[in-house]
Amino acid sequence: MYAIFENGSKQYKVSEGDLLKVEKLNAAIGDTVSFPVVLTADDKGIQVGAEVAKLKVTCEVVSHGKEKKIIVFKYKAKKNERKKQGHRQPYTQIKVVSIGEAAAKKTAAKKKAEAAEKAAE
């Protein structure tokens, strides 16, 4: 089974257990984030639109970082114009924990139970 989810203006194709880099998220390492599903596909077929409106892709934040540097060099011949810039895009690496509505509820309940245990200690 795989799903396509949307984050910002980009779409990503994922399966459970996948690691991927997305645009920088405001979430701490170890936090759980969820994204709305655009499409799912499995043995039964493809589901889109209203069929997947309630589904979520639940992910865990693994790390933050920056991509490799790219060089942007602008040059105009015979004008003595040169401009060199570098850019490193920040990213967040996430691991897909679950795909679907029921799985998202289980993970949230599990996190809530862990928090209650820590508070009790």
Image (cartoon, rainbow, N blue to C red):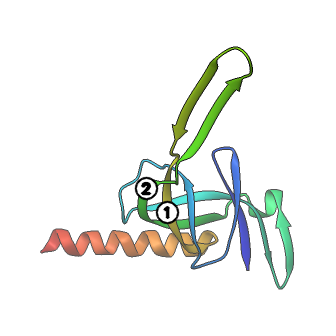
Residue 93 disc label: 1
Characterize the local packing of mark 1: few (<14), some (14-19) or many (20 or more) Cα atoms within 10 angstroms.
some
Percent x, y of residue 108: 44, 68
Q: What amino acid is found at the position of numbered circle 1 in the picture?
A: Gln
Residue 74 as seen in the image, left or right of residue 58: right
Residue depicted at x 53% and y 40%? 87
Q: Would you identify the image quadrant in which residue 63 lies?
A: bottom left
Q: Is residue 116 above or below residue 34?
A: below
Characterize the local packing of mark 2: few (<14), some (14-19) or many (20 or more) Cα atoms within 10 angstroms.
few
Camera-side residue: 65 or 120? 65
Q: Nearer the viewer, mark 2 or mark 1?
A: 2
Residue depicted at x 57% and y 75%? 98
Q: Is residue 38 above or below residue 44?
A: above
Residue 96 as seen in the image, left or right of residue 3: left
**Direction top: furthest residue:** 79
Percent x, y of residue 64: 42, 57
Percent x, y of residue 107: 46, 73
Kindly check if marks 2 and 1 are in contact, taking CB atoms under 8 A apart as contact: yes
Camera-side residue: 58 or 113? 58
Q: Would you identify the image quadrant in which residue 65 lies?
A: bottom left
Camera-side residue: 12 or 102? 12
Residue occupied by mark 2: 65
Residue depicted at x 57% and y 56%? 22
Secondary structure state at the residue bearing disc 2: strand
Q: Earlier in the sequence, mark 2 or mark 1?
A: 2
Residue 26 as seen in the image, left or right of residue 4: left
Secondary structure state at the residue bearing disc 1: strand
Residue 9 disc label: none
**Direction front: furthest residue:** 78
